[in-house]
């Protein structure tokens, strides 16, 4: 089995179009799909997709678009004759308000939405992708071995009491349910910061302004998470932010939070004295 997250009847002979945003995530996906032997095409975003990833694809197998050109993206999917699409990598949240280049299709989508956030916008785009007979894949596909595991992943006892961990998980899940964010930093039953539009790293920095001994980060998901375009991630950048902010622990939802370059993250966490634990 190539991945537990692929749909029933997945055909590995049909190409996948990787719709790539920022960072390491789309590069990990590209490598995993190639390793699985599935044909791959690239839909790159100007000023977002890593140049080194773009360079890996011949011109015939890639297209470059401005953020917001939904109609052009749909045309590219048809031209590539793909069976599947895969969204990986963040697009700068500010582009929802500045730097967006909507074409007629995007304008129509935006006009139809009463609420404009990542979930509603990408959900509407997913519906348009389905209309051209392309299946948008779960964005954990092919990355099964990069997900958080249950228990302490850094090989030693976790330094936070279970009651405090349970409280942090409760706060994070409630914030996720209310669509505020998917993370928080808590300390001994006190909420230091919750994640909102600014993202995980800036939230951790805010928490770092307070007393952080026994503080920890929680990353979770919504009750009805749409993994096709929204997978919470934890990587070396966030680990570095924890270190800078003197937050020495993190708990990540098992099988749902993606650890970007997992082995490297765990090794670096051990060397920095940061404990990582998965929870169900």
Image (cartoon, grey):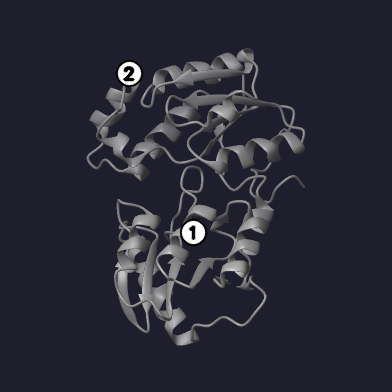
| Number of callouts | 2
The residue that appears at 49% across and 86% down in the rendered structure is 161
Measuring from the top left, give residue 43's x and y in whole percent.
53, 25
Question: Does the rendering let one see residue 217?
Answer: yes
> Is 137 in front, or is 57?
57
Helix, strand or loop at label 2? It is loop
The residue that appears at 44% across and 59% down in the rendered structure is 241
The residue that appears at 45% across and 86% down in the rendered structure is 163
Q: From this view, report whether residue 72 is shown above or below residue 37.
A: above
Q: From this view, report whether residue 191 is shown above or below residue 94.
A: below
| Contact, mark 2 vs mark 1 (Cβ under 8 Å) | no
Question: Does the rendering let one see residue 280?
Answer: no
Measuring from the top left, give residue 88's x and y in whole percent.
53, 39
Tag 1: Cα neighbours inside 10 Å, few (<14), some, or many (≥20)? some
Judged left or right of residue 69, residue 279 is right
Instruction: Residue 125: name its quadrant.
Output: top left
Q: Which residue is mark 1?
A: 240
Q: Quadrant of the C terminus?
A: bottom right
Residue 211 disc label: none
Tag 2: Cα neighbours inside 10 Å, few (<14), some, or many (≥20)? some
Q: N-terminal of the two: label 2 or label 1?
A: 2
Mark 2 or 1, which is nearer the eye? 1
Helix, strand or loop at label 1? It is helix
How many angstroms separate mark 2 from mark 1 (CA)?
A: 38 Å
The residue that appears at 45% across and 80% down in the rendered structure is 166
> Is 97 in front, or is 17?
97
Judged left or right of residue 269, residue 72 is left
Instruction: Residue 268: name its quadrant.
Output: bottom right
Q: Which residue is mark 2?
A: 103
């Amino acid at each position: 089995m190539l991945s537990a997250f692929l749909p029933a009847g997945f055909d590995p002979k049909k190409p996948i179009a990787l719709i790539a945003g920022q960072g390491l995530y789309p590069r990990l996906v590209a490598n995993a799909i190639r390793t699985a032997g599935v044909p791959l095409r690239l839909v790159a975003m100007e000023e977002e997709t890593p140049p080194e990833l773009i360079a890996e694809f011949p011109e015939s197998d890639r297209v470059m678009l401005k953020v917001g050109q939904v109609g052009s993206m749909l045309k590219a999917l048809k031209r590539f004759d793909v069976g599947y699409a895969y969204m990986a990598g963040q697009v700068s949240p500010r582009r929802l308000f500045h730097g967006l280049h909507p074409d007629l299709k995007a304008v129509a989508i935006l006009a139809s939405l009463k609420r404009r956030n990542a979930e509603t916008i990408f959900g509407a785009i997913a519906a348009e992708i389905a209309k051209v007979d392309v299946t948008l894949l779960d964005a954990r596909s092919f990355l099964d071995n990069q997900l958080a595991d249950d228990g302490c992943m850094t090989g030693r006892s976790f330094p936070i009491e279970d009651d405090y961990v349970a409280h942090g998980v409760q706060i994070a899940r409630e914030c996720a349910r209310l669509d505020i964010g998917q993370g928080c930093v808590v300390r001994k039953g006190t909420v230091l910061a919750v994640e909102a539009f600014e993202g995980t790293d800036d939230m951790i920095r805010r928490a770092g302004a307070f007393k952080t001994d026994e503080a920890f980060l929680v990353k979770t998901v919504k009750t009805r998470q749409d993994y096709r375009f929204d997978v919470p991630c934890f990587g070396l950048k966030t680990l570095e932010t924890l270190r800078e902010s003197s937050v020495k622990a993190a708990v990540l939802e098992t099988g749902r939070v993606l650890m970007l370059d997992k082995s490297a993250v765990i090794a670096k966490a051990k060397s920095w004295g940061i404990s990582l634990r998965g929870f169900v």
